[in-house]
Amino acid sequence: MNAPSELNTEEVVRIRLEVLRREHRDLDDAIHALETSGKADQLALRRLKKQKLALKDQIARLEDRLIPDIIA
């Protein structure tokens, strides 16, 4: 392959976004599994939900970096 040896900033952000989205989905699956198991530890659920929310915030910040500012 003749791929460039360096990634530009936008490519790095897009890759990071995909990783965070995957982690967010995994946390969603884990939360759902705990809730449906019937033996959900409320503290663990709260921690997972807080972690999921933090990932959502990181995703939103990175998406904002990719969208150019539009001055009307």
Image: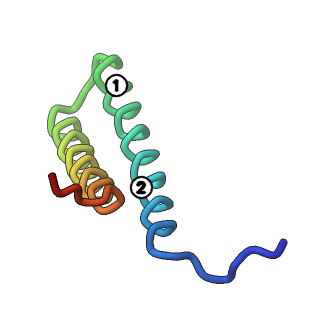
Q: Tell me: residue 39, above or below residue 25.
A: above
Q: How is the image coloured?
A: rainbow
Between 66 and 42, the one lying in front of the other is: 66
Q: Position of residue 10 (x, y in %)?
A: 45, 67
Which residue is drawn at the image coordinates 50% and 60% (left, top)? 15
Nearest to the observer: residue 70 or residue 57:
70
Q: Identify residue type, mark 2.
A: Leu
Tell whether 72 sits left or right of 18: left
Residue at the extreme right: 1
Compared across the picture, whether 47 is left or right of 65 comes to left
Q: Which mark is residue 32?
A: 1
Q: Nearer the viewer, residue 12 or 23?
A: 12
Q: Are marks 1 and 2 in contact (CB under 8 Å)?
A: no
- Residue 65 location, x and y as percent? 30, 62
Can you give x and y, in whole percent of width and height, for residue 26 in the image?
43, 40
Mark 1 or 2, nearer chain start: 2
Task: Assign the N terminus to one quadrant of the image.
Answer: bottom right
Q: Residue at horizontal 46%, vertical 59%?
A: 14
Image quadrant where residue 30 sits: top left
Which residue in the structure is indicated by mark 2? 17
The kind of residue tagged 1 is: His
At which x and y percent is residue 41?
21, 32
Q: Residue at coordinates 26% horizontally, 51% vertically from top-left?
A: 60
Residue 28 quadrant: top left
Q: CA distance from mark 1 to mark 2?
A: 22 Å
- Secondary structure under the numbered disc 2 in the rendered image: helix
Q: Residues within 10 Å of mark 1 (few under 14, many from 20)?
A: few
Q: Is 14 above or below relative to 46?
A: below
Q: Residue furthest bottom?
A: 5
Question: Horizontal placement of 67 versus 5: left or right?
Answer: left
Residue under the image location 36 percent in, 43 percent down: 24
Please tell me whether mark 1 sits on a helix, a strand or a loop.
Answer: helix
